[in-house]
Structure formats: structure tokens, C-alpha cells
């Protein structure tokens, strides 16, 4: 496939372009209050916000809304994914989940029941309680929003704005899965696996955080592999060169689809050369295939290579993904 | 006004009846997982869920969605209230707020801007950062959901399921305010006050919790004064007799409206006789008028009295408000 065409497709796809809306929200909500007692270590721009609550620990806060079209087409899957995405947001910070709250706005009782069934199965799979929330039984349209709170030791947190020049870029995927029958951009890796493995996959990130095996991390989500890496580089104020051929992939899925896929369990890391072996080992132990695919550079561009071709996917001097 | 008619009106009004939807959600999401590391002290049924994270402290989680009609009619006020309601949920537990996340689903850019403006003013007034969230720029309808995380010492938490027989029922309102020009069931007490007083009003609840001046507490919200007391009694598995004439009220507002009002700062407490004076004093110091209005009884009914009349407002042996 022509790399120029692929790059264009990846840049324009909805999973990336809708992130632009974050910028105006972040700018509106800049916080600066001398009476605030806690320590905001990081707010918008990462998979979860980090707030120090004492000498040792920080609370992690994240929230996700499930796209309307997902909820309409498969409310069960929307409910299940609401848990999955939040679980991954906390894991991507190296944290342990405490609990979730949900807000379900339903204008269709059957949809509501299916959403709850999906949430219930998600709660059972991931082992994170849904312990509060709010219900709108009279909404104009169906909306599902979920928030999660987690906890992490301050010295073990995995951030996404801490990539350093010379770090290796590592993509890591659970390659055992299947395309969801209704959503060709969902790579389901969890519904068929025992809950112990699914939970261990996320606990592996806590180990990576504690042992400082990565300098930065994000879970791969809506923007796909390279869009997610782009967001990490954007907030780190760095660039990278990535060889697309090295990204772990399931060979049955076309390349352009794979790179846009929202996987059930996948992460992008930056890491020091000396930690790569251990990082790969920890992930392999929980069935996640990790490969070095590139390197972090000073120049603030995400450059992708494939065979003999090279393209600039994002130039952060001229454009932004989320603007954080 | 005829008490029978008033009771009927209070029972049927939307602020109370929509709480019924909570029951099915709670039943679906019962949690029982031996691997869960933390300590769920309380989940659904209170203003916030309480999860113990160590010997001394517990995290509080709450979430609220802003009613569609509020958002449509006045998006600025919806944004502001999103902060207000969450701040009160944490205060009602005797907790201190850590931070909020929001999910804004907007299909109208102007509405989106107004919502953000309201949130920003709410953040500035209440001193609680909005530190994360999610934006849907392409939603089918406008929805605003906000979650908050707080923290509290386990021995200072104020719960709503801990009312005891013989306790006094105390209603407490900031009576200095005005009906919102667009919403006749909103009693605005905060927009015209300095942020120091507004914040001190909520901090007063932390003092009430620490000094154990109340046995139970809820902030008065959508279901109004008696609907909120009803929810407290329902989860406490108790009843009460209340003299409506003793409820603090602003005399310019008709009684049936006042009792359905969602106030900017108001709480219902149950408390031991010996703590009443101190409780009233702490609240008076921050401009909240508190009065003893009744007593907690064993019989699981909320009985309301006015002059010579008496009515059963809720009979929890036969019906439920939220079913938690």
C-alpha cells in the first residue's frame, strides 16, 4: 500500500480528528486556586488525571463516554466496553482501580437493560466495582458515560508526557482476538479469555510502573496505534521515527484497518534500551506481544516508514491532535 | 393548603418519581469479588460511594447527570450546577473534594461554549478543579455528566443510612437566595455570595462529620426536602414524623413550591438531642438556618403533620423511592 495514502487515511480518520475538541475544553478549565489542598500532578492530557493526596500516594481520575453509534448498534457491547476502556485508562497510568460510577441516559428500556447486562459482564471480567452513578430514565437519546478512580504510588506512576530523546518506541498488543462482528475497528481480546488473564494483563502495567521499565505509556484507544503514539509525543513535546512493518499485528487484518483498530488490550510505550528485554518479558508473560518499532527524536514530528517509503504523519510545529 | 393534596403532589412530582429507576441498576450491579483489594464501605444508596483505601481514609465517588431540559434551557446554569451538585454530594458525606471529571456531549457549539463557561464559574466558586474528562463533539443530543472524587477519614464520614430511632430530624437551608428566573424549582443561594462563604458552607459539613454532630445526612436535591428525607429514611430502614410548619423556609415562596425546590445549599440531618445546639451553631456560622422539625421513629413511614392534619407521605412497607 502506498504510504502517503495510508498516512492520509490515518490522519483523517474520526478516531484522531475528534480529539481536537479537547483543546477548547482544556483551555477553558485551567485551574489556579491557592486554597486547593491537594497536589494536581497532571490534569488533562493523559489517560487519567493524577492528584497527590499524601506523601506517597496519588489518586487517578478518568472518564469516558461511549460513542452514540456504538450504543445504538450494540448496547451490550457499549456497556462492556465502558468498563474495559476505564480499566485500561487506569492501567495505562500504572495504577490500581478503586471503583467506577456511571451515568446512563436511556430513552429505550430494552437498550437500558442491554447496557446494564454489558456493564455487569465487564465488572465481572475486570473485577472493578461499579459503585455509584446516576440514571436518567427520560433522556432524549441514549448516552453512557463512565468514570473511574484509581490509586498509584507517586514514584510508580506511568505518564504519557515523559518520553525522552533516544527512547525506544514499543508497541504491545494482545494478538489473540477477533474483529467484533458489528464493529470492524474493535479488536476483541477479552470476552473469550478467563478473567484471571485479563486482570493480570492490566496488573502487568503496575509492575512496569513499579520497576520503571518505561518512560512513558498510553493504552491504544480510539485514535489507533499511531494516533495514540502521536498524542503521547504531542504532550511529551517530542517526535519519533516508526517503522510500520515492525508493529505487532494480526496478519489476517488489512494494515490500514489494523492501524485504526481500537484493541481490547494494547499499549504504546517509550523505554530505555536497557529495559526493553524486561519490558517485553513482563508483557509476554500475560500474552501481550511487544516489539521495538522506532525511536523518540527531538524533532517534533511523527515520521512513519514502510519499506523504502517515508512520510510525516504529524508535524506538531504546525498542527495538533488534542492540543493539551 | 389541604395536606392530603400537598402530600399527593410531593409524592408524584418528577424529582421523586424518577428515583425509582435506580433500583434496577443497583440490582444488576451487585458486586462480590474476592480479588478486590479495597473495602467497599458503601455503594449505591448514598450521596457518594465510600471505599476504604487504608487504615484511616476512604475515597468518595459520586456522579451526576444534568437533566436534559436544564441543559437545553440554560446551558450556562447547567454547567454551573454540575459543579454545585457534585460539591454538595461530597460535602454531604463530610468529605473534602479532590477533583472532577466531566463528559460533555454536544451537538451545538454555542451550547458547548455556554456549558464550559458555567463549569468554569462553578470551578472558581467552589474551588474544585475539573481535571479530566471526555468530549463528544458529534453527539445526537446535548448531555452533561460530571463525576467527583473526594476523600474523608473513615471515622468522620456522614452516611445517610445511619439514622437512629429517637434522633431529631433537622432541616437546614441557606434562606438567602432567589428563585432562578428560568427554573422555578431552583433556589439559587450561591451565585451572589463570595466564594469564601460558599466554600465555608460546605466545609461546615466536614466539621459536623469530624465532631459527630449528626447521625445521618443528605444534601437536599431533586426530590426536595421531604423526598430527600424519604430517601434517607428508606436506606436507614426507619420512619419519621415531621411537622411541615417547622421546616425553614423563605416566606415569599409558596409552600408546595418550597418543598419541591432544589436548593443551592441545604441539608437534612438526623441528630441526637444533645448535639442539636452545636449542630445549629456550626451551620448558623455559615448562614445556614437549621431547625428541629421532627423525630425518627421505628415504624417505616414518613408521616407529615401540618396544623391539625396528618398524612402518610411514604409507607416503606408498601413502596420505595429508590429501592436501595
Image (spheres, coloured by chain):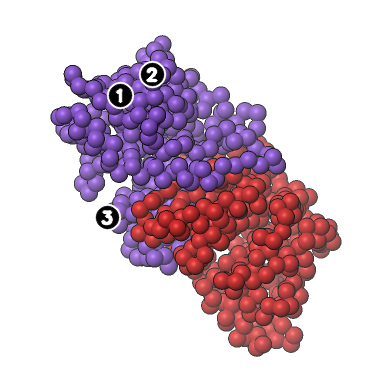
Chain colours: A purple, B red
Residue A232 in view in this figure: no
**Label 3 with label 2: CB-CB less than 8 Å:** no
- Say which residue appears at 53% left-offset and 50% top-offset: B147
Q: Which residue is mark 1?
A: A303
Instruction: Report crowding for label 2: few under 14, some 14 to 19, many 20 or more residues within 10 A (C-alpha).
Output: many
Which of discs 3 and 2 lies nearer the camera? The answer is: 2
Could you tell me which secondary element the residue under label 3 belongs to? helix
Q: Which residue is mark 2?
A: A297
Q: Gap between marks 1 and 2, in whole Å?
A: 10 Å
Instruction: Report crowding for label 3: few under 14, some 14 to 19, many 20 or more residues within 10 A (C-alpha).
Output: few
What subunit carries mark 2?
Answer: A
The correct choice, above or below, for B251 with respect to A26 in the image is below
- Say which residue appears at 56% left-offset and 56% top-offset: B118
Which of discs 1 and 3 lies nearer the camera? The answer is: 1
Q: Gap between marks 3 and 2, in whole Å?
A: 41 Å
The correct choice, above or below, for A321 with respect to B159 in the image is above
Q: Earlier in the sequence, mark 1 or mark 3?
A: 3
Q: Which residue is mark 3?
A: A73
Could you tell me which secondary element the residue under label 1 belongs to? strand
Q: Residue B189, position in %: x, y? A: 68, 63
Q: Gap between marks 1 and 3, in whole Å?
A: 36 Å
What subunit carries mark 1?
Answer: A
Could you tell me which secondary element the residue under label 2 belongs to? strand
**Label 1 with label 2: CB-CB less than 8 Å:** yes
Amino acid at each position: 500500500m502506498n504510504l502517503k495514502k495510508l498516512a492520509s487515511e490515518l490522519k483523517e480518520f474520526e478516531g484522531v480528528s475528534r480529539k481536537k475538541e479537547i483543546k477548547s475544553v482544556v483551555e477553558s478549565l485551567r485551574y489556579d486556586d491557592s486554597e486547593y489542598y491537594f497536589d494536581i500532578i497532571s490534569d488533562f492530557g493523559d489517560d487519567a488525571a493524577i492528584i497527590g493526596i499524601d506523601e506517597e500516594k496519588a489518586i487517578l481520575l478518568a472518564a469516558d463516554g461511549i460513542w452514540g453509534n456504538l450504543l445504538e448498534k450494540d448496547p451490550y457491547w457499549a456497556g462492556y466496553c465502558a468498563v474495559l476502556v476505564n480499566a485500561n485508562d487506569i492501567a495505562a497510568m500504572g495504577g490500581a482501580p478503586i471503583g467506577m460510577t456511571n451515568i446512563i441516559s436511556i430513552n429505550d428500556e430494552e437498550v437500558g437493560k442491554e447496557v446494564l447486562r454489558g456493564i455487569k459482564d465487564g465488572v465481572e471480567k475486570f473485577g472493578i466495582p461499579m459503585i455509584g452513578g446516576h440514571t436518567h430514565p427520560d433522556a432524549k437519546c441514549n448516552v453512557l458515560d463512565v468514570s473511574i478512580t484509581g490509586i498509584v504510588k507517586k514514584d510508580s506512576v506511568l505518564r504519557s508526557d515523559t518520553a525522552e530523546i533516544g527512547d525506544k518506541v514499543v508497541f504491545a498488543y494482545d494478538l489473540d482476538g477477533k474483529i467484533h462482528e458489528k464493529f470492524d475497528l474493535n479488536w476483541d481480546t477479552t470476552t473469550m479469555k478467563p478473567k484471571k488473564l485479563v486482570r493480570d494483563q492490566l496488573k502487568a502495567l503496575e509492575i512496569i510502573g513499579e520497576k520503571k521499565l518505561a518512560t512513558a505509556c498510553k493504552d491504544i484507544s480510539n485514535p489507533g496505534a499511531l494516533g495514540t503514539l502521536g498524542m503521547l509525543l504531542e504532550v511529551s513535546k517530542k517526535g519519533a521515527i516508526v517503522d510500520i512493518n515492525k508493529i505487532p499485528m494480526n496478519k489476517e487484518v488489512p494494515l490500514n484497518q489494523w492501524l485504526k483498530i481500537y484493541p481490547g488490550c494494547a499499549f504504546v510505550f517509550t523505554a530505555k534500551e536497557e529495559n526493553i528485554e524486561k519490558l517485553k518479558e513482563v508483557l509476554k508473560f500475560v500474552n501481550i506481544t511487544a516489539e521495538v518499532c522506532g525511536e523518540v527524536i527531538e524533532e517534533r514530528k511523527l515520521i512513519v516508514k514502510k519499506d523504502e517509503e517515508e512520510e510525516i504523519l504529524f508535524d506538531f510545529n504546525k498542527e495538533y491532535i488534542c492540543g493539551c
